[in-house]
Image (cartoon, rainbow, N blue to C red):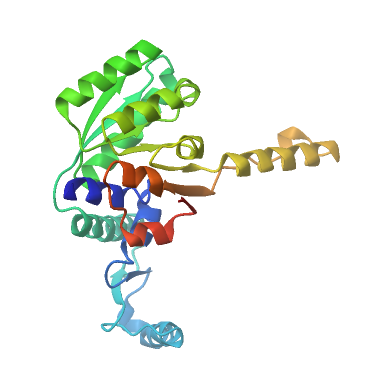
Amino acid sequence: MMRRREFITLLGGAAAWPLAARAQQLAMPVVGVLSPTSFDNNADRLRAFRSGLAEHGYVEGQNVAIDFRSADGRLDRLPALAADLVRRQVTGLLHELAPATARVAVLVNPANVGREQSTRAQLEPAARVLGLQVQFYNASTNQEIDTAYATMMRERPDALFVAGDALFTSRRVQLISLAARHALPAVYASREFVEGGGLMSYGTSIIDMYRQVGAYCGRILKGEKLADLPVVQTNKFELIINLQTAKLIGLEVPPMLLARADEVIE
């Protein structure tokens, strides 16, 4: 059960930055400072930076750590330094949260080639960073969903992630029932699953997506040309947790995760 609980903690964020932000609540937060020039020549700026932190109650070494990185005037080094800064902090926090390797089943629909490939491309490198063992299962029909679950239960993963897919959304009652029957902690890509009795979802806000579409339509109706409108990426994500389901499968959701949820169904 502990390994499952640790895995659920990790799923407080599906992407590295949201996850890191939440993980930092467990220990002393780390602020990364990246400069194109040497810090030796910017002592006054660093004092001002520390002063700004102190104004909000944060003192280096007491309740916040600062990780300084300098390119020493070589601007070409900045991308690599930034990547290393992120990798070190996120990886360290994740290892603190989940020292044990969890085995995660991922359900995908191979008939939806683009989505299936995208899911694999995103999850496989993320799993390596998190130290998770990921096993993909295919299902393109109702019967294949049952078959995939039967195979999972023989292999007993610690948790399940159901990839976003129209088929899975239309069969969410079937998927939710199977997860509940086998007491398998399952995370989904949209809130409809959690509202129907699923454990947890983390994904883009469909409501916000439709709001953006409506805003686009309004701009077009006012005379703006479609070719002139910028491409907008969804930047609103929501974490939904169903506490009733957690209790039914005997899972304790960490208070930190509940505090960070956008909505908790009780």
Q: Quadrant of residue 206?
A: top right
Camera-side residue: 116 or 11? 11
- Using residue 177 as the reference point, say whether residue 210 is left or right of it: right
- Using residue 162 as the reference point, say whether residue 127 is left or right of it: left
Name the residue rendered at 34%, 61% in the picture.
Answer: 255
Query: Residue 239, image x and y in percent?
Result: 45, 49
Name the residue rendered at 21%, 20% in the picture.
Answer: 151
Q: Give the number of marks.
A: 0
Camera-side residue: 39 or 187? 187
Name the residue rendered at 32%, 65% in the picture.
Answer: 24
Query: Residue 173, image x and y in percent?
Result: 44, 26
- Using residue 45 as the reference point, say whether residue 185 is left or right of it: left
- Residue 78 visible in the picture: no
- Using residue 9 as the reference point, say whether residue 115 is left or right of it: right
Query: Residue 94, image x and y in percent?
Result: 24, 55
Name the residue rendered at 32%, 53% in the picture.
Answer: 253
- Residue 237 visible in the picture: yes
Residue found at the very far right of the displayed protein = 222
137 versus 203 height, above or below: above
Query: Residue 224, image x and y in percent?
Result: 81, 39
Q: Quadrant of residue 101?
A: top left
